[in-house]
Amino acid sequence: MGLVKRNEWMMLGTMLVTVTLWIFGERLDISTLAAAIMGLSVVLILRVLSWDDYLSEKLAWNTLTWFAVFLGMADQLIVLGVIPWFSGRVGSFMKSLAVRCYIEPLILQTIYFFIHYGLWVRQPILVLYCHPENAPNG
């Protein structure tokens, strides 16, 4: 394998800074998007990777594009009130059942199963649907 090259050290340093900003950026008032763009910019400016290297990763760009679309859709579900409405319906349904405490988790797991496999086609929507605290701030 040989010695670690200059570009590899720069990539490692950039990744460490980017991940650190991603984790602790909220305390520094730096969004995760800004941290990611900074990391990408540093790698491009330092010529660790070229723009052609990035463009040649078609699968990654495809994934990123679809991920962005589904995150946007999930955010709009929150903005339009679909998620609070559905959560309220599930809560009312669970209260109306008045079942024993060991049955409730089974019912909730069944609802979760149908949300996961029946309604939504992508994981990002599910994550934001079930955990709205992860929604992008807009």
Image (cartoon, helix red, strand yellow):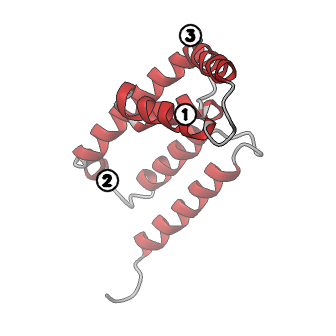
Q: Secondary structure at mark 1?
A: helix
The answer to whether mark 1 and mark 2 are in CB contact below 8 A is no
Q: Quadrant of the C terminus?
A: top right
Q: Indicate the position of residue 103 as horizontal and vertical percent values.
A: 61, 38
Read off the residue under disc 1.
107
Foreground pick, 112 / 84 = 112
126 sits to left or right of 86: left
Of all residues shown, which one is farthest toward the right?
Answer: 27
Q: Quadrant of the N terminus?
A: bottom left
> For the image shown, how many numbered marks are present on the structure?
3
Q: Secondary structure at mark 3?
A: loop
Q: Indicate the position of residue 127 as horizontal and vertical percent values.
A: 51, 36
Q: Nearer the viewer, mark 1 or mark 3?
A: 1
Q: Nearer the viewer, mark 3 or mark 2?
A: 3
The amino acid type, in three-letter code, at marker 2 is: Ser
Q: Secondary structure at mark 2?
A: loop
Q: Earlier in the sequence, mark 1 or mark 3?
A: 3
126 above or below 5? Answer: above
Of all residues shown, which one is farthest toward the top?
Answer: 80
Mark-to-mark CA distance, 3 and 2: 41 Å
The amino acid type, in three-letter code, at marker 3 is: Leu
Foreground pick, 109 / 63 = 109
The answer to whether mark 3 and mark 2 are in CB contact below 8 A is no
Residue found at x 30% / y 46%: 60
The amino acid type, in three-letter code, at marker 1 is: Ile
27 above or below 137? Answer: below
Read off the residue under disc 3.
80
Read off the residue under disc 2.
50
132 above or below 21? Answer: above
Foreground pick, 4 / 130 = 130
